């Protein structure tokens, strides 16, 4: 519910807790959203949180390749992901 400070409270918890995870991401979900764009944003945020380079081909990957990339990356890591404005 908008206007209740949900994002502010969640942001404080996220900032406090993210150090306990190998990677983390805060994803702002636009309305309407496209699944591929959310996946791209998520991959980029996770990689940036570990100071890893984002592959150049990420902008041309289809949904299946993005899903596989996420699975591959997350299966070995402890992670924190926040989807805001869902």
Image: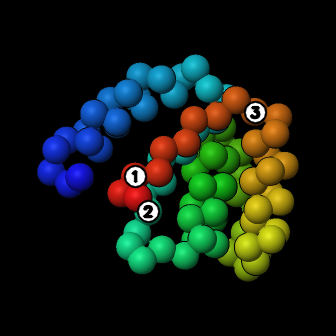
Q: On residue 29, which mark appears?
A: 2
Circle nearer the viewer, 3 or 1: 1
Residue 8 visible here = yes
Look at the numbered disc 1 and give the secondary structure of its residue: strand
For the residue pair 58 and 20, the one nearer the viewer reads as 20
Q: Around disc 2, counting alpha carbons within 10 Å, would you say few (fewer than 14), some (14 to 19), or many (20 or more)?
A: some
Give how far apart the Cα atoms at labels 3 and 1 are: 22 Å
- Quick one: which residue is furthest to the front in this view? 1
Please tell me in which quadrant of the rendered image residue 37 appears: bottom right
Is residue 23 rendered to the left or right of residue 2? right
Residue 24, horizontal then vertical, whole percent: 58, 38
Q: On residue 84, which mark appears?
A: 1
Q: Which residue is mark 3?
A: 77
Residue 56 visible here = no
Look at the numbered disc 3 and give the secondary structure of its residue: loop
Is residue 22 rendered to the left or right of residue 55? left
* 2 and 1 marks in contact (CB < 8 Å): yes
Is residue 31 rendered to the left or right of residue 33? left
Q: Residue at x 73, y 73 (%)?
A: 63
Give how far apart the Cα atoms at labels 2 and 3 are: 23 Å
């Amino acid at each position: 519910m908008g206007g209740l400070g949900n994002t502010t409270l969640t942001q404080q918890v996220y900032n406090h807790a993210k150090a306990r995870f190998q990677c983390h991401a805060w994803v702002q979900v636009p309305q309407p959203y496209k699944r591929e764009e959310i996946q791209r944003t998520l991959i980029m945020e996770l990689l940036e949180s570990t100071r890893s380079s984002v592959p150049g081909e990420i902008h041309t990957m289809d949904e299946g390749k993005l899903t596989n990339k996420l699975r591959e990356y997350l299966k070995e890591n402890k992670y924190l992901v926040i989807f805001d404005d869902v």
